[in-house]
Amino acid sequence: MEKRQVYSEMLCLAGALSAVIAGAYVRSKYERNHFVVEKTVISSTKIKEAKTLVFLTDLHDKEFGRGNELLLRAVAGIDPALVLIGGDTMVAKAGLDNLAVTERLLRGLSRIAPVYYGNGNHEQRLKKEAAVYGNEYRNFLGLLKQSGVVYLADASVAVGADLRISGLDIDKPYYRDFFPKQMEREYLQRHLGPADCDRYQILLSHSPLFHRAYADWGADLSLTGHFHGGTIRVPVLGGVMTPQFQLFQPYCAGTFERDGRYMIAGRGLGTHSVNIRLNNLPQVVAVELQPER
Protein backbone atom coordinates (compact mmCIF):
# COMPACT_ATOMS: atom_id res chain seq x y z
CA MET A 1 0.00 0.00 0.00
CA GLU A 2 2.77 2.41 0.92
CA LYS A 3 4.68 1.64 -2.27
CA ARG A 4 1.54 2.27 -4.35
CA GLN A 5 1.00 5.56 -2.56
CA VAL A 6 4.60 6.66 -3.13
CA TYR A 7 4.36 5.65 -6.79
CA SER A 8 1.09 7.55 -7.16
CA GLU A 9 2.58 10.65 -5.57
CA MET A 10 5.59 10.43 -7.86
CA LEU A 11 3.30 10.23 -10.89
CA CYS A 12 1.38 13.27 -9.67
CA LEU A 13 4.61 15.18 -9.11
CA ALA A 14 5.91 14.20 -12.56
CA GLY A 15 2.62 15.27 -14.13
CA ALA A 16 2.65 18.60 -12.34
CA LEU A 17 6.27 19.22 -13.33
CA SER A 18 5.51 18.37 -16.96
CA ALA A 19 2.59 20.80 -16.92
CA VAL A 20 4.78 23.56 -15.50
CA ILE A 21 7.48 22.95 -18.13
CA ALA A 22 4.90 22.87 -20.93
CA GLY A 23 3.30 26.07 -19.65
CA ALA A 24 6.68 27.80 -19.39
CA TYR A 25 7.54 26.73 -22.94
CA VAL A 26 4.28 28.09 -24.34
CA ARG A 27 4.65 31.34 -22.41
CA SER A 28 8.28 31.74 -23.47
CA LYS A 29 7.37 31.25 -27.11
CA TYR A 30 4.66 33.87 -26.79
CA GLU A 31 6.98 36.38 -25.12
CA ARG A 32 9.71 35.95 -27.73
CA ASN A 33 7.25 37.05 -30.39
CA HIS A 34 5.52 39.97 -28.63
CA PHE A 35 7.46 43.12 -27.79
CA VAL A 36 6.35 46.14 -25.76
CA VAL A 37 7.11 49.85 -26.08
CA GLU A 38 8.15 51.40 -22.76
CA LYS A 39 8.77 55.11 -22.24
CA THR A 40 11.22 56.84 -19.92
CA VAL A 41 11.08 60.61 -19.35
CA ILE A 42 14.29 62.45 -18.47
CA SER A 43 14.71 66.20 -17.93
CA SER A 44 17.90 68.23 -18.22
CA THR A 45 18.90 71.88 -18.36
CA LYS A 46 21.05 70.92 -21.37
CA ILE A 47 18.01 69.98 -23.48
CA LYS A 48 16.81 72.97 -25.52
CA GLU A 49 13.67 71.42 -27.08
CA ALA A 50 11.72 68.31 -26.14
CA LYS A 51 12.43 65.29 -28.33
CA THR A 52 11.85 61.55 -28.28
CA LEU A 53 14.54 58.98 -29.05
CA VAL A 54 14.03 55.29 -29.76
CA PHE A 55 16.62 52.85 -28.43
CA LEU A 56 16.87 49.31 -29.83
CA THR A 57 19.35 46.67 -28.74
CA ASP A 58 20.09 42.94 -28.99
CA LEU A 59 17.82 42.08 -31.91
CA HIS A 60 19.97 39.02 -32.74
CA ASP A 61 18.33 38.47 -36.15
CA LYS A 62 14.83 38.41 -34.70
CA GLU A 63 11.98 39.55 -36.94
CA PHE A 64 8.55 40.61 -35.71
CA GLY A 65 6.40 40.12 -38.74
CA ARG A 66 7.61 39.91 -42.30
CA GLY A 67 10.67 42.11 -42.75
CA ASN A 68 10.21 43.30 -39.15
CA GLU A 69 7.11 45.21 -40.25
CA LEU A 70 5.57 45.13 -36.75
CA LEU A 71 8.70 46.55 -35.15
CA LEU A 72 9.09 49.23 -37.83
CA ARG A 73 5.44 50.19 -37.49
CA ALA A 74 5.83 50.57 -33.73
CA VAL A 75 8.93 52.74 -34.12
CA ALA A 76 7.19 54.92 -36.71
CA GLY A 77 4.25 55.32 -34.34
CA ILE A 78 6.54 56.83 -31.70
CA ASP A 79 7.63 59.47 -34.26
CA PRO A 80 11.20 59.68 -32.93
CA ALA A 81 13.66 62.43 -33.68
CA LEU A 82 16.45 59.79 -33.70
CA VAL A 83 16.81 56.01 -33.56
CA LEU A 84 19.76 54.72 -31.54
CA ILE A 85 20.99 51.14 -31.84
CA GLY A 86 22.99 49.61 -29.02
CA GLY A 87 24.54 46.68 -30.88
CA ASP A 88 24.08 42.95 -31.40
CA THR A 89 21.60 43.36 -34.23
CA MET A 90 22.96 40.14 -35.72
CA VAL A 91 24.24 36.82 -34.37
CA ALA A 92 27.98 36.42 -34.92
CA LYS A 93 28.54 32.70 -34.56
CA ALA A 94 30.43 30.57 -37.07
CA GLY A 95 27.98 29.33 -39.69
CA LEU A 96 25.15 31.56 -38.43
CA ASP A 97 26.41 35.02 -39.37
CA ASN A 98 24.00 36.63 -41.80
CA LEU A 99 23.25 40.31 -42.37
CA ALA A 100 19.89 39.90 -44.14
CA VAL A 101 17.77 40.79 -41.10
CA THR A 102 20.06 43.68 -40.20
CA GLU A 103 19.83 45.04 -43.73
CA ARG A 104 16.03 44.97 -43.80
CA LEU A 105 15.81 46.60 -40.39
CA LEU A 106 18.29 49.40 -41.08
CA ARG A 107 16.73 50.28 -44.42
CA GLY A 108 13.32 50.46 -42.76
CA LEU A 109 14.49 52.50 -39.77
CA SER A 110 16.34 54.97 -42.00
CA ARG A 111 13.05 55.85 -43.66
CA ILE A 112 11.64 56.81 -40.25
CA ALA A 113 14.40 58.88 -38.64
CA PRO A 114 18.20 59.32 -38.60
CA VAL A 115 19.87 56.19 -37.21
CA TYR A 116 22.97 56.07 -35.00
CA TYR A 117 24.64 52.70 -34.42
CA GLY A 118 26.99 51.58 -31.63
CA ASN A 119 28.74 48.22 -31.48
CA GLY A 120 27.89 45.25 -29.28
CA ASN A 121 30.08 42.24 -28.73
CA HIS A 122 28.75 40.50 -31.86
CA GLU A 123 29.78 43.39 -34.13
CA GLN A 124 33.13 43.32 -32.38
CA ARG A 125 33.51 39.65 -33.31
CA LEU A 126 32.90 40.45 -36.99
CA LYS A 127 35.46 43.24 -36.73
CA LYS A 128 38.24 41.39 -34.93
CA GLU A 129 37.86 37.76 -36.03
CA ALA A 130 38.29 37.96 -39.80
CA ALA A 131 39.68 34.40 -39.86
CA VAL A 132 36.24 33.19 -38.75
CA TYR A 133 33.91 35.69 -40.45
CA GLY A 134 35.85 36.64 -43.59
CA ASN A 135 34.54 39.80 -45.23
CA GLU A 136 31.40 40.03 -43.10
CA TYR A 137 32.57 43.13 -41.24
CA ARG A 138 33.39 44.89 -44.51
CA ASN A 139 29.93 43.93 -45.76
CA PHE A 140 28.46 45.32 -42.56
CA LEU A 141 30.24 48.65 -43.05
CA GLY A 142 28.94 48.80 -46.62
CA LEU A 143 25.42 48.13 -45.41
CA LEU A 144 25.63 50.95 -42.85
CA LYS A 145 26.83 53.37 -45.51
CA GLN A 146 24.17 52.36 -48.02
CA SER A 147 21.46 52.76 -45.38
CA GLY A 148 22.69 56.21 -44.34
CA VAL A 149 23.38 55.05 -40.77
CA VAL A 150 25.88 57.00 -38.64
CA TYR A 151 28.32 54.43 -37.27
CA LEU A 152 29.84 55.25 -33.88
CA ALA A 153 32.70 52.83 -33.31
CA ASP A 154 34.78 54.66 -30.71
CA ALA A 155 33.45 57.85 -32.22
CA SER A 156 31.24 60.81 -31.35
CA VAL A 157 29.01 63.19 -33.27
CA ALA A 158 27.14 66.38 -32.37
CA VAL A 159 23.44 66.23 -33.23
CA GLY A 160 21.38 69.38 -33.43
CA ALA A 161 21.91 72.17 -30.94
CA ASP A 162 21.93 70.16 -27.75
CA LEU A 163 22.98 66.52 -28.20
CA ARG A 164 26.24 64.67 -28.53
CA ILE A 165 26.15 60.91 -29.14
CA SER A 166 29.17 58.68 -28.56
CA GLY A 167 29.62 54.97 -29.24
CA LEU A 168 32.11 53.02 -27.13
CA ASP A 169 33.78 49.82 -28.35
CA ILE A 170 34.26 47.60 -25.30
CA ASP A 171 37.17 45.17 -25.38
CA LYS A 172 36.68 41.46 -24.81
CA PRO A 173 37.94 41.19 -21.19
CA TYR A 174 35.04 43.38 -20.09
CA TYR A 175 32.52 40.95 -21.60
CA ARG A 176 34.06 37.55 -21.14
CA ASP A 177 34.64 36.71 -17.50
CA PHE A 178 32.38 35.92 -14.55
CA PHE A 179 34.38 38.58 -12.72
CA PRO A 180 35.01 40.95 -15.64
CA LYS A 181 37.75 43.54 -15.75
CA GLN A 182 36.66 46.74 -14.03
CA MET A 183 36.29 49.79 -16.23
CA GLU A 184 37.53 53.21 -15.17
CA ARG A 185 36.87 56.70 -16.54
CA GLU A 186 40.31 56.72 -18.15
CA TYR A 187 39.27 53.84 -20.40
CA LEU A 188 36.52 55.98 -21.93
CA GLN A 189 38.92 58.92 -22.20
CA ARG A 190 41.33 56.80 -24.24
CA HIS A 191 38.59 55.52 -26.54
CA LEU A 192 36.45 58.65 -26.90
CA GLY A 193 38.32 61.63 -25.54
CA PRO A 194 36.51 63.92 -23.08
CA ALA A 195 32.75 64.03 -22.73
CA ASP A 196 30.87 67.12 -23.92
CA CYS A 197 30.01 69.28 -20.91
CA ASP A 198 27.79 71.72 -22.80
CA ARG A 199 25.61 69.37 -24.84
CA TYR A 200 23.55 66.51 -23.44
CA GLN A 201 26.02 63.63 -23.67
CA ILE A 202 24.51 60.29 -24.73
CA LEU A 203 26.68 57.18 -24.62
CA LEU A 204 25.99 53.97 -26.52
CA SER A 205 27.89 51.32 -24.57
CA HIS A 206 26.73 47.74 -24.82
CA SER A 207 27.37 46.47 -21.28
CA PRO A 208 25.45 47.91 -18.30
CA LEU A 209 28.06 46.77 -15.78
CA PHE A 210 29.99 50.02 -15.84
CA HIS A 211 27.51 52.75 -14.95
CA ARG A 212 29.96 54.34 -12.50
CA ALA A 213 32.65 54.69 -15.18
CA TYR A 214 30.15 56.05 -17.70
CA ALA A 215 28.86 58.64 -15.21
CA ASP A 216 32.37 59.60 -14.06
CA TRP A 217 33.37 60.13 -17.71
CA GLY A 218 30.45 62.52 -18.15
CA ALA A 219 27.65 60.58 -19.85
CA ASP A 220 24.33 62.22 -19.03
CA LEU A 221 22.53 59.17 -20.41
CA SER A 222 24.09 55.77 -21.10
CA LEU A 223 22.12 53.34 -23.27
CA THR A 224 23.08 49.70 -22.73
CA GLY A 225 21.81 46.15 -23.22
CA HIS A 226 23.67 42.84 -23.53
CA PHE A 227 21.97 41.04 -20.61
CA HIS A 228 18.62 40.43 -22.37
CA GLY A 229 16.83 41.43 -19.17
CA GLY A 230 18.31 38.44 -17.36
CA THR A 231 16.50 35.87 -19.58
CA ILE A 232 13.98 34.99 -16.84
CA ARG A 233 12.74 37.75 -14.54
CA VAL A 234 11.56 37.01 -11.02
CA PRO A 235 9.46 39.57 -9.12
CA VAL A 236 11.55 41.55 -6.61
CA LEU A 237 14.74 39.60 -7.46
CA GLY A 238 14.94 40.72 -11.11
CA GLY A 239 16.80 38.98 -13.93
CA VAL A 240 18.07 35.48 -13.20
CA MET A 241 21.21 35.21 -15.32
CA THR A 242 23.51 37.25 -17.55
CA PRO A 243 25.52 35.93 -20.53
CA GLN A 244 28.48 35.80 -18.10
CA PHE A 245 26.45 33.54 -15.77
CA GLN A 246 26.13 36.19 -13.08
CA LEU A 247 23.01 35.50 -11.03
CA PHE A 248 20.49 38.25 -10.22
CA GLN A 249 22.74 41.02 -11.47
CA PRO A 250 20.93 44.26 -10.50
CA TYR A 251 21.75 45.99 -13.81
CA CYS A 252 19.97 43.38 -15.96
CA ALA A 253 17.23 45.83 -16.96
CA GLY A 254 15.76 49.17 -15.97
CA THR A 255 16.61 52.83 -15.51
CA PHE A 256 19.32 53.79 -13.04
CA GLU A 257 20.51 57.15 -11.73
CA ARG A 258 23.90 58.11 -10.29
CA ASP A 259 24.55 61.71 -9.26
CA GLY A 260 22.03 63.01 -11.77
CA ARG A 261 23.36 60.87 -14.61
CA TYR A 262 21.18 58.09 -16.01
CA MET A 263 21.66 54.65 -17.49
CA ILE A 264 19.00 52.59 -19.24
CA ALA A 265 19.66 48.85 -19.52
CA GLY A 266 17.36 47.66 -22.30
CA ARG A 267 15.93 44.14 -22.19
CA GLY A 268 16.62 43.77 -25.90
CA LEU A 269 14.47 42.28 -28.63
CA GLY A 270 15.90 38.87 -29.46
CA THR A 271 17.65 35.87 -28.00
CA HIS A 272 20.46 33.57 -29.02
CA SER A 273 22.00 30.40 -27.62
CA VAL A 274 19.54 30.41 -24.66
CA ASN A 275 16.25 31.00 -26.49
CA ILE A 276 14.14 31.69 -23.41
CA ARG A 277 12.20 34.68 -22.15
CA LEU A 278 9.93 34.46 -19.11
CA ASN A 279 8.31 37.49 -17.49
CA ASN A 280 10.67 39.37 -19.77
CA LEU A 281 8.96 40.73 -22.89
CA PRO A 282 11.23 42.10 -25.64
CA GLN A 283 11.45 45.87 -25.37
CA VAL A 284 11.50 48.98 -27.52
CA VAL A 285 12.74 51.88 -25.37
CA ALA A 286 11.33 55.34 -26.02
CA VAL A 287 13.27 58.08 -24.24
CA GLU A 288 11.51 61.44 -23.95
CA LEU A 289 14.07 64.17 -23.30
CA GLN A 290 12.60 67.37 -21.87
CA PRO A 291 14.04 70.76 -20.97
CA GLU A 292 14.33 71.28 -17.24
CA ARG A 293 12.97 74.66 -16.29
Image (cartoon, grey):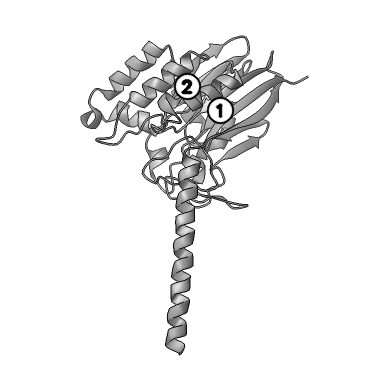
Q: Is 235 or 208 nearer to us in this picture?
A: 235
Quick one: SS at disc 2?
A: helix
Q: Is residue 22 left or right of residue 99?
A: right
Quarter of the rendering occupied by the C terminus: top right
Decide which of 46, 37 is in the foreground and name it. 37
Say whether marks 1 and 2 touch (CB < 8 Å). yes
Q: Which residue is mark 2?
A: 192
Q: Tell me where residue 59 sits by quadrant.
A: top left
The crowding category of the residue bearing disc 2, from other C-alpha atoms within 10 Å (few below 14, some 14 to 19, many at least 20), is some
Q: Which mark, residue 217?
A: 1
Q: Earlier in the sequence, mark 1 or mark 2?
A: 2
Residue at point 44% right, 48% down? 179
Residue 245: image tag: none
Please provide percent x and percent y for residue 199. Answer: 62, 16
Q: Amino acid at mark 1?
A: Trp
Q: Is residue 144 above or below residue 124?
A: above
Q: Residue at x 56, y 40 (%)?
A: 253
The percent position of residue 8, horizontal first and vertical second, equals 45, 79
Q: Position of residue 53 (x, y in %)?
A: 59, 21
Between the residue at mark 1 and the residue at mark 2, the CA separation in whole angstroms equals 10 Å
